[in-house]
Image (cartoon, helix red, strand yellow):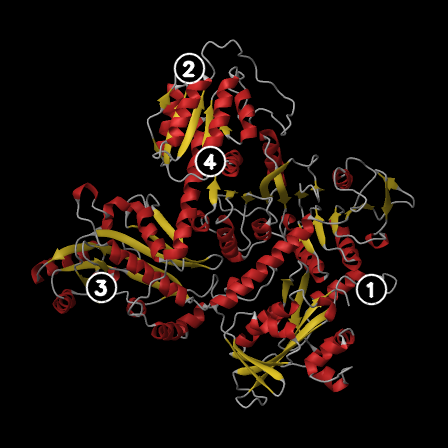
Amino acid sequence: MDDSAAPHPEQDPTPARTAARQDRAPAVPDYPQHWEADVLLRDGGTARIRPITPADAGRLVEFYEQVSDQSKYFRFFAPYPRLSDKDVRRFTHHDFVHRVGLAVVVRDRFIATVRYDRIDADGRPSETGTDAEVAFLVQDAHQGRGVASALLEHIAAVAQERGIRRFQAEVLPENRKMVKVFTDAGYVQRRSFADGVVHLEFDLEPTAASLAVMRAREHRAEARSVQRLLTPRSVAVIGASRNPQTVGRTLLRDLLNGFAAADRPVYAVNRNAPPGTELDGLPVHRSVLEIPGPVDLAVIAVPASAVPQAVAECGAHGVQGLVVVTAGYAETGPEGRDRQRALVRQARAAGMRVIGPNAFGLISTDPEHPLNASLAPVLPARGTFGVFCQSGAIGVALLEAGHRRGLGVSSFASVGNRADVSGNDFLQYWAEDPATEVVLLYLESFGNPRKFTRIARRLAQAKPVVVVKGARHTGSLPPGHAVPATATGLRDATVDALFQQAGVTRVETITELYDTGDLLAHQPLPPGDRVAVVGNSDSLGLLTHDACLSAGLRPRTPVDLTTAATGENFRIALDTALTDPGVDAVIAVAIPPIGSQSWGPRPAVRPAGPDGPTGPDDQGAGPEVGSDDPEIAAALLAAGERARAAGKPLLLAHLALTDLPDRLRPGGIPSYPAPERAVRALAHAVHYADWRRRMAEAEETARVPELDRIDEAGARALVDAALSTRPAVAARTQPGGARITLPDPEAAALLARYGIDVSPTLPAPDEESAVRAAAALGYPVALKATAPHLRHRPDLGSVRLDLTGEAGLRHAHRELDELLGGAAQAALVVQRLAPRGVDTVIGATVDPAVGAILSFGLAGAPAELLGDVAHRLVPATDQDVASLVREVRAAPLLFGWRGAEAVDTDALEELLLRVSRLVDDLPEVASVDLEPVVVAPHGLAILGARVRIAPLPVRSDLGPRAMSTL
């Protein structure tokens, strides 16, 4: 049975009900709803995995009838033409603990099943064993689509949840496809052969290999699903109207401009069209079901109330993907969000992916498969930029800005509410697309930040990824965007950490997006940060020099050729700079000749050249002149070729020139009408190139070192015990989750299991207790308040240091007792005095959407007032923590600033690695705060620690592949 087959409309006149039946979980006691998942298959199609219930008896029988005799033989090791009633009952009745069956469903029909049965050590049915027998059956028409691989991931996760640790399977040697499914999965396996049967055993604990296999399959499936959307063989516009001003008619005209051909038909659909109606020379069909041939892509532009019927008909006709431009979904409120979820469920149930709803559309400039399924009036020029955005208005701006600059795109997507297809899917596609060299993104929210980081990091190692992130300061969520509750309030510092570690270049504006993309697309990556500035204006050269210094680059003194410079002067100076081994990049600066007579108003429009539009830049109007010296342009073009051969970028910063940038465009030399823009673009390229080099080096040298004094089992026992206490159990019912703060002694004990030693404190509720505590710890000591409102507030006078004897301690205790309203209220403690050094703060916070984030800064004003804190994602390598320590602006204080003695950064980096290891090993640890950590010239002291824990979160990025269900 082909998965594109569907009931004839005469047999099933209401295909919308089919999807609705599949979306509802069968009414079975203890039905595990959370096992249901939408998945992408190898060919880019969608399917749903869910538990099998007694209500599925008819589906199972129909499914089995479509399986070939050979596949049945492989499953049962004997001819087995049909299922008996006993078989049907056995395969549909499960307790969801010891016996579990899952099915892959497309259009309400089974295309594959899997079942496990728990067994004991002797292979007999058991309710206590940790092994299970597993068996698969896939319809022949769907073999080779990755169905069994997806099922294996999900049944393994289910089995682990139910306490099963190992699968056993028996496979006939001739069933090579099934043997390959098991052997390619990446699990630790044992294999034997006896009595003509291959016996396989494999542990279900995920391994690095199994995760790598899963992610490689995810990558291929998601890339393929986007490719199918961008390269349809036929397209239908549902909602095409006789009114030329409607969205549907606009989409139809745009599609006809380039897509339609004898082998790529476009169809118009309008349910209310009278018989014989034609639009733009095309006959209008009343339904997709009336179209005589296959339809790969449907563009839907009908009212929201009519969308479900249109989607149902598309599913019944075998459509592969939808572009839904219709609005009225999640952006309108809760009811709209429900409609949006229903739309996605309905489409996926029929094997379709969705762009939108509320989408601007989809564009591909591939000359073999041009596509303009968008509201853009003109297909953009062919280029190397892959462009993705979440806003239709920004999408228009991005296309228009690229058009003005003469920069083309390989593909473009503006996905609106991105209820299904997201930026992550397009990143997967662009990683494989040879036509895309630079990726430009406008993002307003993240559906899966952790996955974005993983995919972007892999992509950025080969292709630049440049991002504008909207809502940077407000953190607001645009209407209609579906994100997990955990991802709605991502701090901007967290987003920066995501981008930085993933090698993503973050810019502030759309102008800067193209400034940076233009340089990255057309010039070599700079080998370093040393910049030569050459040009015919001393003033412009100095401005460029200053901008380089502000951007953290190392510019040389500008070379001023004077305003009388000729093309030959530029050629010699540029050659000198490019051949200098101490120069990594060259910025040429140019102004019009003084006294030029060609001043005049800037033209409103200029004709397009052979390489695309050559209109003026987007920085406003004003008096400008053309370049009246073609020799300078020729010198720059020749220098551009030498720069490319030398592996050094060359760019132009100019003032009041229009023709010179146009002359340079064929040579790929980016031009900027202000030195600050040129320098910002170059600085981004320098940082990206440095990240690429560090990543290449890290693959060879970076590691997570083995650390002594690590007792993971002991730490886990402490966490489990803490989570079982009455306060922890009670906290689970509180709003916001179940995070609880461990008492200081328990926190110190947990940290000690990872070699993190907190300086002990002893309570000092009265003078005598303080004296006894000091005697036990040894002088000199400190006396400090630890009440929550006084913690880390020495500015309130809550700390007394350098107490070397009993008399001084008693005096200090009386002072604080009086100042703070009583020793008990202030929670006074005595602590042994730490050696003098630099006070720092270390933290690790688990963001449910992103994962664990390791933070470092200098305590007090640098971190609290100035926000001078650096972040890395966990697990951190030795190179990560070394760069983390050096990234904060106050880092010179650690390395002997102004003649001070440098502190022990080796000990500091080891502590950061231990904290990283702790939160990575124990996901129940929600946060760790160490403050202050006094780093001395030799060693360090942790004077304060707070640990919060929570029940184990769901780490969706580490589980089986599943599409978002937001």
The tag earlier along the polypeptide, 3 or 4, is 4
Of residues 420 and 141, which is closer to you in this image? 141
Q: Quadrant of residue 890?
A: top left
**Mark 3 belongs to which amino acid?**
Ser
Instruction: Please state the horizontal and vertical placement of residue 529, each as a whole percent of the image.
Output: 37, 37
CA gap between label 2 and label 4 equals 29 Å
CA separation in Å, label 1 and label 4: 61 Å
Instruction: Name the residue tied to disc 3.
Output: 759
Q: Earlier in the sequence, mark 2 or mark 1?
A: 1
Instruction: Residue type at mark 1: give it.
Output: Pro
User: Do the residues bearing badges 1 and 4 touch, measured as CB atoms within 8 Å?
Assistant: no
Q: CA distance from mark 3 to mark 1?
A: 73 Å
Q: Which residue is disc 1 drawn over?
A: 7
The amino acid marked with disc number 2 is: Thr
In the depicted structure, whether residue 753 falls above or below residue 336: below
Question: Of label 3 and label 2, which has the lower sequence position?
Answer: 2
